[in-house]
Image: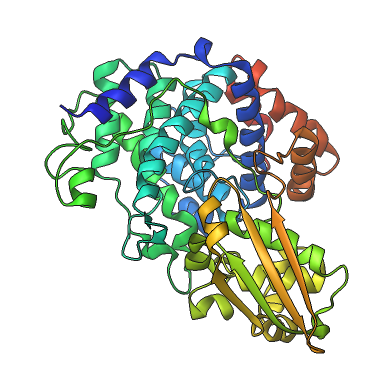
Amino acid sequence: MDYALDQITEFVVGARAEAVPNDVLKHVTGILVDSLACALAAKDCPGARVAAAIVDVPRGPGGTVIGSRAEATLDMAAFWNTSMIRYLDYNDGFTAGHPSDMIGALVAVAGARGLSGPTLLSGIAVAYEVFHRISLKHRSYRKDRGALVDNLSIDQGFSVAIGAAAGLAHMLGYDRDRTRTAISLAATNGLPLRASRAGELSHYKGVATAVSTRQAVFACQLAENGLTGPSDPFEGRHGFIEVMEGKAGPMNLEPFGVEWALLRSALKYFPATSNCQIAIWAAFELREDVTAADIAEIVLHTSRFLRHESGSEPAKWAPTTRETADHSLPYVFSVALLNGEVNESSYSEQMLHDERVRELMGKVSVVVDDQIEAEWPDTLQIRVTATKADGTTREIHAADPKGTYRNPMRRDDIKAKWRNLVTSVFGAETDHMFDLAWGIADSDDCTKVFEQLVTE
């Protein structure tokens, strides 16, 4: 008996669209529109180009590709969409990853099946709840009495595959057996290595979760057509718990039904990894009375996770690719301090090799702050100590960056981000397209919405 699998299955089957509260659907609408903006702005990213080159032609109704009329199988459309949503590293953050990566799969299938807007939104909501609980368990292995477990090598795609499969099963109205099978298959083949995020980051970093969403769609197709799956993928022999802990046992997932966790999810105000957002705000505050030329040394006091992920490898002080730079704490901090902004131009070839940025990064060190660590991840914060050439110091403490649940991005903030990302695509129609996307909750067929967002 795999109680964790049963627990997820019962939640997915039981949470039909009418049971999802309005405030949750409203929150999901903002997430979806934010994700669409990220995708539309990255329609020519490496993952999208690869998908277009190897695309499979569907024998039936093809999956919906955001911004395109391209014909693709459901799983390839999921890969294509998620590649675009993920590429700019501008989409949301929650628990231990980027759950809006799952939206690529849900849009691909919802558009192909002509599902309603509310059905798509409720599918996203269900996917987020499952993702959150799997990620919580996964994240628990990242700490050992406050210290990061350095040998943990499983990436967030594990939670993405399971959450996406759950959202699809819910959205498509699978019965218990098919739901259970889809989730089991996604879990059994969903353990991607975190090597995709180590060292000098490659193109694969931007498509790693796209591979996971493609896998989730395939798992659902197998389940829908009667294939059975492993009975105990989480708690049984050779299951997830045994892999992580050395012996089988209970997964102890956070219970469903107490609250909708996704209401605590965050959107990104800047195109940089989630935990680095607060460093950008701190740099803005510091530059109000300190110039880069004044600085002799900067110490960034952070959580263990932020230091480990974005401030512990030599490559983060010498990024040569966008993928590495937007995950580099010293880079985004230095660019923000020098330029007073972090946007798409911050990752141009010129900026990546700018001597001013390299010189300032050389003055930056990153250390773990015990108090900040104790309050992470509930509070994202950073403490900056800047020592000037004359020996005087300036200290900045920043917390709860714009976009986090205590300081959320509202509709107007998301609209401003939409304009920034897609005005070059839609021109004078930009605001109309925003209203169209935001109104998806009123659509009886979400395909009609996505067809109007085509940019080709």
* Quadrant where the image shows the C terminus: top right
Residue at horizontal 54%, vertical 32%?
262
Residue at horizontal 29%, vertical 38%?
186
Residue 320 figure quarter: bottom right
Q: Is residue 318 above or below residue 204?
A: below
Q: In this view, does 291 lie above or below 418?
A: below
x, y percent for residue 333 = 69, 69
Query: How many numbered discs, if any?
Result: 0
Is 394 or 68 nearer to us in this picture?
A: 394
Looking at the image, residue 223 sits to the left or right of residue 100; the answer is left
Residue at horizontal 41%, vertical 32%?
130
Q: Is residue 442 above or below residue 66?
A: above
* Quadrant where the image shows the N terminus: top left
Residue at horizontal 53%, vertical 40%?
100
Whether residue 383 is visible here, answered yes or no, is yes
Looking at the image, residue 227 sits to the left or right of residue 396; the answer is left
Looking at the image, residue 279 sits to the left or right of residue 101; the answer is right
